[in-house]
């Protein structure tokens, strides 16, 4: 029976463990922080639970347009809705802990070994088999032999020497769930996905927000049309966005946090979230000694079946960089185990990855981008339909958002798409299926959709791309 040791229990690790176990391997997971990793304990599950509360607040804010009004016990009109952040965060942490426990129980019931500790490569690792050393919390060590090793150690928030988090007022995105009182003014440094999501969520929770962006708009890595819609909505709702502004330092003085920008301006608030990137957890694992090549940022280099440059050593998840998503981590881990154990495997196709930014409105993308078309990298036709023309959107009071469909010129094969709007994460799926299955716009257009529905805009966009 082949033996597999997985270092890290996040999506890349536990999904790989389940596949390897299914394929008959003896599997051991060495995990330091808790099954589910940051995705479950400090990132995806907590942040999206917080965002779920923010979504309810957003919906309530537009209830009057739909004819719904709130009154207190005396019959007077209620003029505001307040959030109890202490209760919200208690629920967030409880759900994360429960999800982690569920994953651990699932692995245990399948007979997968779990060692709580920090793993590193030992003797013989990187030569098609070798030793993994697990250091327990009490400092004792345990050695496990493996025919293959998967590195799935994730990443942690980047911080600056001039902006040190204290866990109370100056926070990384992993620390925000310890807040028990609602901030009076949240400053978010960083306008990438993480920064934009937290800025949008706290704004919806009724907190004044200032977003410090080093670029000229939010979400510089996303579709420009989508980012423009989001920025317009956030500013309309009252967010202050400081574009082309770089943080120089963040300091705390009692209950006040001051962010100093490189141009000398200062911004003061009650709290600050630092969302300025991630650092891979690859130091001290014995990777380079085993022949595992890292890039300049410390991320593990892998191929399309998750192999590293060392025989018998695979890697998956945020420690490899690229698309730092729970879904891609899980896929890379599954691919790694199928490849090692000789099962049928399909290499990772980056153009089939669907991703979502959980702001309000959400932004979902898949496949080729508008930027690639504009640069001449690929020839394609594009149609963009505003959601405000969709009958279901009108019924629900949706005013912002669109569906964009991208088709290869000549063949009409769907090669990409963008959705901006409520639950865009759900609406991107039919476009993802079309991209993965190489469907043409005519095939998408001729598939029945429900009337009225937001998905009707996907079919309508496809009809407008009909190849004459």
Image (tube, rainbow, N blue to C red):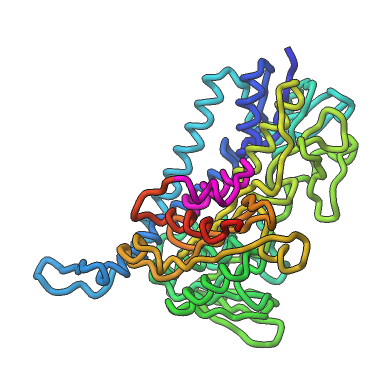
- Determine the image quadrant of residue 364: bottom right
Residue 37, placed above or below residue 1: below
Inspect this view and state whether residue 46 appears: no
Does residue 433 show up magenta in the picture?
yes
The residue nearer to you, when weighing 319 against 458, is 458
Q: Residue at x 68, y 43 (%)?
A: 317
Image side of residue 168 versus residue 260, left or right: left
The residue nearer to you, when weighing 329 against 89, is 329
Residue 121, placed above or below residue 158: above
Residue 57 is situated, as x and y percent measured from the top left of the image, at 35, 64
Residue 376, placed above or below residue 96: below
Q: Residue at x 81, y 40 (%)?
A: 303
Q: Residue at x 67, y 51 (%)?
A: 411
Quadrant (top left/top right/bottom left/bottom right) for the N terminus: top right
Query: Start and end of the magenta stretch?
Result: 424-447
Q: Residue furthest bottom?
A: 264
Residue 23, placed above or below residue 89: above
- Determine the image quadrant of residue 68: bottom left
Does residue 264 show up magenta in the picture?
no
Residue 306 is situated, as x and y percent measured from the top left of the image, at 76, 37
Residue 59 is situated, as x and y percent measured from the top left of the image, at 33, 63
């Amino acid at each position: 029976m082949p033996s597999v040791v997985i270092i890290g229990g996040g999506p890349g690790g536990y999904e790989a463990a389940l596949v390897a176990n299914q394929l008959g391997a003896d599997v051991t997971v060495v995990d330091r922080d808790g099954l589910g990793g940051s995705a479950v304990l400090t990132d995806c599950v907590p942040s999206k639970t917080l965002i779920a509360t923010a979504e309810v607040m957003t919906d309530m804010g537009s209830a009057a347009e739909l004819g719904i009004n709130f009154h207190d016990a005396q019959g007077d009109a209620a003029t505001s809705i307040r959030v109890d952040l202490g209760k919200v965060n208690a629920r967030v942490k409880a759900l994360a802990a429960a999800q982690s426990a569920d994953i651990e129980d699932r692995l245990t019931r399948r007979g997968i070994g779990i060692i709580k500790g920090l793993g590193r490569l030992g003797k013989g690792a990187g030569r098609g088999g070798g030793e993994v050393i697990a250091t327990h919390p009490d400092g004792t060590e345990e050695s496990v032999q493996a025919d293959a090793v998967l590195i799935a150690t994730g990443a942690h928030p980047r911080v600056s020497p001039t902006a040190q988090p204290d866990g109370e007022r100056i926070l990384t995105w992993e620390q925000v769930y310890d807040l028990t009182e609602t901030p009076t003014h949240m400053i978010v440094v960083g306008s990438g996905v993480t920064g934009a999501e937290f800025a949008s969520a706290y704004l919806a929770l009724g907190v004044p927000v200032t977003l410090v962006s080093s670029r000229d708009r939010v979400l510089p890595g996303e579709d420009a049309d989508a980012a423009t819609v989001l920025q317009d909505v956030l500013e309309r709702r009252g967010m202050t966005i400081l574009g082309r502004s770089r943080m120089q330092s963040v300091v705390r003085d009692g209950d006040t946090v001051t962010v100093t920008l490189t141009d000398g301006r200062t911004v003061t608030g009650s709290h600050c979230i630092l969302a300025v990137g991630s650092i891979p957890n690859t130091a001290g694992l014995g990777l380079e000694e085993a022949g595992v090549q890292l890039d300049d940022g410390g991320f593990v280099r892998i191929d399309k079946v998750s192999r590293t440059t060392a025989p018998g050593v695979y890697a998956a998840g945020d420690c490899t960089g690229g698309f730092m998503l729970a879904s891609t981590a899980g896929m890379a881990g599954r691919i790694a185990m199928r490849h090692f154990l000789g099962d049928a495997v399909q290499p990772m196709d980056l153009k089939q990855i669907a991703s979502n930014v959980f702001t309000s409105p959400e932004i979902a993308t898949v496949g080729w981008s508008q930027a690639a078309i504009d640069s001449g990298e690929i020839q394609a036709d594009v149609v963009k339909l505003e959601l405000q023309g969709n009958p279901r959107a009108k019924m629900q009071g949706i005013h912002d958002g669109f569906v964009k469909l991208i088709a290869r010129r000549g063949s009409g094969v769907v090669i990409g798409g963008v959705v901006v709007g409520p639950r865009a994460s759900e609406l991107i799926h039919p476009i993802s299926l079309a991209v993965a299955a190489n469907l043409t716009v005519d095939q998408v257009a001729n598939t029945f959709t429900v009337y009225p529905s937001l998905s009707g805009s996907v079919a309508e966009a496809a009809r407008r791309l009909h190849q004459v």
